[in-house]
Amino acid sequence: MKTYDFVIVGSGIAGLSFALKASQHGTVAIVTKRAGEESNTNYAQGGIACVTSDEDSFELHIKDTLESGAGLCDEAAVRTIITDGPARIRELVEIGVHFDERDVGDAGGRELDLGREGGHSKRRVLHARDVTGREIESALIRAVKANPDISFLENHTAVDLITTAKLGYVTGNRCVGLYALEERTGDVHTLRSDRIVLATGGCGKVYLYTTNPAVSTGDGVAMAWRAGATIANMEFIQFHPTCLYHPEARSFLISEAVRGEGGRLVDGAGREFAQKYHSRGALASRDFVARAIDAEMKRTGERCMFLDISHKPADFVRDRFPNIYENCLRFGIDITTQPIPVVPAAHYQCGGIKATVDGKTSLAGLFAIGEVACTGLHGANRLASNSLLEGIVMADRAMGFMLRDRPPGRADEFAHALPDWKRGGAVDVDEMVVIYHNWDEIRRLMWDYVGIVRTDKRLQRAATRLMNLQREVQEFYWNFRVTTDVLELRNLVTVAAIIVDSAVSRKESRGLHYTLDYPDMDDNRFLKDSLIWRT
């Protein structure tokens, strides 16, 4: 058993930011199942929304966020995260993050070059070309790896949380550690801490088509649910409207910033259509734009729609979107002269582990920050580029809360040794094809039945099949030695079932949850969070 003051699962903006602050107050371990750089943060293109301009205001940013959230935002949480933002941006700059600037006036002055995205009434998105996430992730990784007080456990997969209830104690249930699988050796390590911080990101890989990297299998939500923590609003899965459509392209996002800089949504004949669905057209919030593209594809029978920015100067397009330009060019698409074929794809988890803006969950000793948490910031639909902001603000606030509530060095309430992982009679996996088949089936049924447009019949079909899959996967988990593939499959089927159960319970259409059986919002019955916990 290894003991730390803080154990963090995940290595995106939230987890790394928290680790840097926590290392000033105690011993820290970061558990991440691939290389440290492999996180949702690293793939974020558009930027980070924050009020930094005199032409903008906190009130406008708050108003835009509340409107996007379709009535389900927690206004206090929104206000806290938005007003804390500028201080956290300054901290990013201090550790070496370079945001794009532009020349101002004849005196040679410089100011932040702010972008605008769907749902925003002002330009407020800080960016580093179209690789903002990579710029932030790289700076944080450098700082963490240079810190001798942080143990960075790469290629380690969290297996499950350890709680006092699981250990047989009947009072005061709390999280006291976790098991982590070391992929290289196959050993499962026991990590003991009174402060377990889940920063595992989202669950995009539960869908067949997603902009998320392969690591996004909903691990944090699944582990927290199994431990008894409350989960909220998992029916609200955001589909990004514009993922590159090409037979050889895998999950490549076309940033919302392309539309923010004047990109037009058009059909195969070059006709704009977004204005038919919302007064803001292509700059409406993501739920409206994704449904508009989906509706046009179904109406016309086309396999994709198109995003066209070829009317802008070629030098501007190449300079502002170098990553998108180069990637599209690899597939034979010159975005300075051709429209980009696009389709919606699963992108962001607006629900998650129910948490305060300080990361506190319903389970003592367990904290959740970033995308894995549901604070009320996003409501029923996330405003573009608010995610990175939430991650870095929550990291700071969680650290402050822990220092006030349970500072390192204080005597442990639970001073017992934790048991080692027991393999029992488990044997090595004999047929990996079973794992891959179940993985594929889960993702396809979620895409077909629990996608952008839903019905009761589709949801019921998904629920019935998922019940059988859960039994199969659970049997697999107990009979064979754990591997990363087995653990991800177990988490994937758990999160899929939580999404379906949440969607079934909401008999209305709101934000990202749109059902043909209940096409209108019902504030009288459903102006509240959908809450699920293990009984």
Image (cartoon, rainbow, N blue to C red):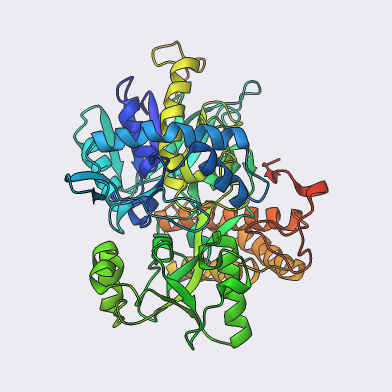
Picture residue at 66% right of the left edge, 69% below the top: 453
* Residue most extreme to the right: 524
Q: Can residue 30 be seen in this view?
A: no
**Viewer-proximal residue, 445 or 173?**
445
Q: Position of residue 515 (x, y in %)?
A: 72, 65
Tell me the quadrant of the picture where the C terminus can be found.
top right
**Viewer-proximal residue, 94 or 86?**
86
Q: Can residue 430 be seen in this view?
A: yes
State the image quarter where residue 171 is shown: top right
Tell me the quadrant of the picture where the N terminus can be found.
top left
* Residue most extreme to the front: 106
Above-or-below relation of 228 to 482? above
Q: Position of residue 406 (x, y in %)?
A: 47, 17
State the image quarter where residue 361 is shown: top right
State the image quarter where residue 446 is shown: bottom right
Left or right of 83: which side holds 145? Answer: left
Above-or-below relation of 431 to 506? below
Number of numbered discs on residues: 0
Left or right of 471: which side holds 432? Answer: left
Q: Position of residue 422 (x, y in %)?
A: 46, 40
Picture residue at 29% right of the left edge, 79% below the top: 334
Above-or-below relation of 203 to 439? above
